Amino acid sequence: MPRLSALYVHPLKSARRLSPASAPVEPWGLAGDRRWMLAARDGRFVSQRDHPRLALVRVEPRPDGGLLITAPGAEPLHVDAPSAERGDPLADVHVWGTPFQAAEAGKEADVWFAELLDADLRLVHLDDPRRRPSDPEYAPGGTVSMADGFPLLLTTTASLDALNAHIAADHPGDPVAGAPLPMARFRPNLVVDGTEPWAEDGWRRIRVGEVAFRVVKPCTRCVVTTTDQETGVRGAEPLRALGRHRRFGKGLVFGQNLVPERPPGRIGDVLGTLHLGDPVTVLEEGPRPVPGR
């Protein structure tokens, strides 16, 4: 049976991942995932697309809800969690055209990131995730954190192995260009072992442990996947290999976006807790799309 082999939480959008052994699931994603974000002064979200050095920023949640942020060559930064309820100012921000409001972390954090990335940025916190609606075409009435579009992203190790085989075959005799890529390049939340390659293309509903999810949309990939998450240095892969072998229409696909289902009668925001080793059950399947069509 397929099983959950890795969990990843990204407290700050586009910064370094955490790898917990378990994680509560909320309607807008894993608890603590992508609840903080950097934004330009015009409100546009900022990510590794703009600043690949964000891969080197480490973020540790504090028990009081704040963050400890570190990066090479910078002094540690302690940030308290801002909140509109306490009177902290709200900033108008947007992620891929979806506008919402987030609480400003304050000048000290803004200066720290400005010096690190040489850019005029604001650190903001989604203190109330209900402020950002999810895509009504795929998740009507839902909410999402500061993730690109959906609460969770799932990938499988079998598909990564298949993609790495394509990369090696596309670069014969070049051990550097053809080197296998780690899963961290794709910044998922859930990683599943024990499937066939690309089996997730046909999933429509799954259960992981005690939580059911709708598989709503393939994840189209961008330049962030070419960024080494340990060094912040960019290369050419996997976009070249995805372009050759995983092109669906105009998108290069790796992974599937998930929306959690609220169990009947469940009260509160925690829908269940995922644990490493949880079984993954496919509840509903559909036809697998064919690349290149």
Image (cartoon, rainbow, N blue to C red):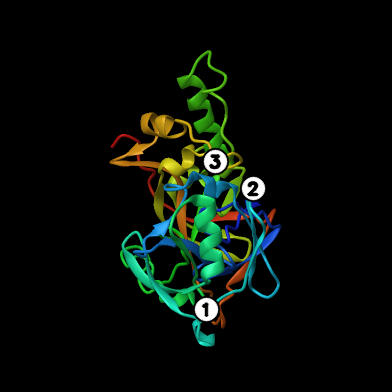
Disc 3/disc 1 C-alpha distance (Å)? 44 Å
Q: CA distance from mark 1 to mark 2?
A: 50 Å
The mark nearer the N terminus, 2 or 3, is 2
* Of the two numbered discs 2 and 3 in the rendering, the one whose residue sits closer to the viewer: 2
Question: In the image, which disc is placed on residue 95?
Answer: none
Q: Is residue 185 above or below residue 80?
A: above
Q: Are marks 3 and 1 in contact (CB under 8 Å)?
A: no
Tell me which amino acid carries mark 1.
Pro
The structure residue drawn at horizontal position 31% and vertical position 62%, both measured from the top left corner, is 97
Between disc 1 and disc 2, the foreground one is 2
The residue at 55%/38% (across/down) is 228
Q: Secondary structure at mark 1?
A: loop
Kind of element beneath mark 3: loop
Q: Nearer the viewer, mark 3 or mark 1?
A: 3
Q: Amino acid at mark 2?
A: Gly
Q: Which residue position is annotated with label 2?
A: 73
**Badge 2: how crowded within 10 Å, few (<14), some, or many (20+)?**
few
- The structure residue drawn at horizontal position 40% and vertical position 59%, both measured from the top left corner, is 45
